[in-house]
Image (cartoon, rainbow, N blue to C red):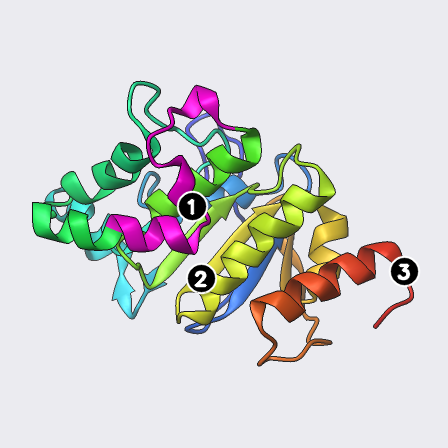
Amino acid sequence: MRYPSGDTGLNQATFQVDREEFVFLVGSTGSGKSTVMRLLIKELEPSEGTIRVAGKDLTRIGRRRVPLYRRNIGVVFQDFKLLPNRTVHDNVAYALQVTGGTRKEIRAKVPDILRLTGLSTKLHNYPDQLSGGEQQRVAIARAFVNHPPLLLADEPTGNRDPDTSIDIMRLLYRINRTGTTVLVASHDHVMVDRMRRRVLELSRGRIVRDEATGLYARDETTREFAQRLRSTGQRPDTV
């Protein structure tokens, strides 16, 4: 990916993420993480090469079909992008409304996703009445309400306290266990190390590390998962 300014966003960056994987994308500012995310949602077009999602070549998806493609991708933005004048319930419902969801679908899906994300008691609150962690949960709920096969999260634990970060990762892990592939761009090296999932590291647009850090039980429950993260944080030598 080369930008009009002449800057290189990505340079011969080739990788594959399998269905139901949980993968971290790490690297310093300007390394290419955001470029990958923007390419995956077709906000950018690659200068060369091919991007395939679920076997489909994204360069062959015309502009008119981009909204349909994006319905199958959940995106959690770093700045949440919540609607300030809508309640938690209506923020999540909006994601269904813009994709043509019926009232029946909204009544069925929104309460379920609010329970999954621990927001059932906050459904009538507005974004400015929520903590940063709760706002992040709303953003995740909105991204997942359609149960997309792919979820992209940009710095979901940025500037969060350790307990809130663990809760957010626990939620993303729970979503991953439902069968959704999760790709997380993160600067939080401590959390990435604790998670022990696959890590793709970018530097100046190139992939410099692709490490499957599989020192974890694949069938651990979300509670066991959270306990492991907390115990790892207290005792760095815990395995």
Q: Residues within 10 Å of mark 2 (few under 14, many from 20)?
A: many
Task: Pick the residue in front: 193 or 229.
Answer: 229
Q: Position of residue 222 (x, y in %)?
A: 57, 67
Residue shown at 89% from the left, 60% from the top: 236
Numbered circle sitting on residue 110:
none
Looking at the picture, how far across and down is residue 91, in whole percent?
29, 33
| Residue at 57% over, 41% down | 155
**Is residue 198 left or right of 141 when viewed as pictured?**
right
Q: Any magenta on residue 116?
A: yes
Residue 235 disc label: 3
- On screen, residue 157 above or below 55: above
Amino acid residing under circle 3: Arg
Within 10 Å of disc 1 (Cα), the crowding (few <14, some 14-19, many 20+) is many
Report which residue position mark 2 lands on. 175
Residue 198 percent coordinates (x, y): 62, 67
- Magenta-colored span: 110-130
Q: How many C-alpha atoms fall within 10 Å of the one at disc 3: few (<14), some, or many (≥20)?
A: few
Query: Residue 63's x, y, as percent?
Result: 16, 42
Q: Give the residue number, with chain letter if any, for mark 1.
A: 140
Which amino acid type is marked by label 2? Ile
The number of numbered badges drawn on the structure is 3
> Magenta region, mostly helix, strand or loop?
helix
Dot 1: what SS? Answer: helix
The reply to whether discs 1 and 2 touch (Cβ–Cβ < 8 Å) is yes
Q: In whole angstroms, how far apart are the C-alphas of marks 2 and 3?
A: 27 Å
- In this view, which residue lies farthest toward the front? 121
**Horizontal side, residue 93 vs residue 24: left or right:** left
* Sequence-first tag of 2 and 3: 2
What's under tag 1, amino acid-wise? Ile
* Sequence-wise first label, 1 or 2: 1
In terms of sequence position, does the residue under pointer 1 or pointer 3 come before the other?
1
